[in-house]
Image (cartoon, rainbow, N blue to C red):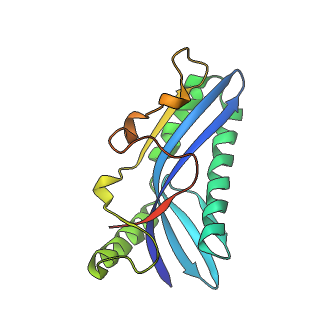
Amino acid sequence: MSQLPLFFQFRNLIAGDGFIAFVATRGRVLLSEEDGKIWMYGVQPGGLAAFGSDRQSAFESFRVEYHRVLEDAAQGAASFTAFRGLVQELFQQIHEPAQADWETARQRVLSYGPSNQGLPVIRAENFPSAIEVLSVQSDDFDPRKLQPSAAAASGSLPLDVHYGKAA
């Protein structure tokens, strides 16, 4: 079984009952090749998993699953404030077994040197896990100027999926 420690960044617009939220997420996922399938296991946020026939399809499945979790949270929230609290709580959940495997895979990557997997090597300390949940209905919300505080050091989070191997 081959494993890679990966990072992800997602930006999602989520509609709830009486609110629209922008959710910017930076997290960690463990890629694992098992029985001819590629699995993505959420490390932070934990509790998510998806698979595909190749890396891209597995990651796309993971992205869709994450979006579904956010939509479910919005449907169960009575307000934006309740939604933000729920999403922040979900994000703080770390899947400990996946975290241990992620760290083992990260140490393996560090011992290899430059990436031979076709992925950029990103130092873990330069890509902290973080989440930002903002109300789109706020008067000062301007998506063109959006710089979630968690991502301010490296710029705004992209709209699409990007992944890189951890170093």
Question: Residue 142's spot in the image, x, y percent?
Answer: 53, 24
Residue appearing at x 53%, y 75% in the figure:
32
Asked whether residue 1 appears in the rendered view, the answer is yes
Question: Looking at the rendering, which quadrant does residue 5 occupy?
Answer: bottom left
Does residue 68 appear to the left or right of 138 in the view shown? Answer: right
Question: Looking at the rendering, which quadrant does residue 33 occupy?
Answer: bottom right
| Vertical placement of residue 79 versus 62, above or below | above
| Vertical placement of residue 44 versus 54, above or below | above
Number of on-image labels: 0
Residue appearing at x 28%, y 74% in the figure:
110
Q: Furthest-top residue in view?
A: 139
Does residue 52 appear to the left or right of 108 in the view shown? Answer: right
| Vertical placement of residue 114 versus 20, above or below | below
Question: Residue 58's spot in the image, x, y percent?
Answer: 63, 68
Query: Which quadrant does the C terminus fall into?
Result: bottom left
Question: Residue 26's spot in the image, x, y percent?
Answer: 46, 49
Residue appearing at x 67%, y 61% in the figure:
61
Residue appearing at x 63%, y 85% in the figure:
35
Question: Residue 10's spot in the image, x, y percent?
Answer: 55, 48
Q: Furthest-front residue in view?
A: 144
Asked whether residue 93 appears in the rendered view, the answer is no
**Between 93 and 64, which is closer to the camera in this rendering?**
64
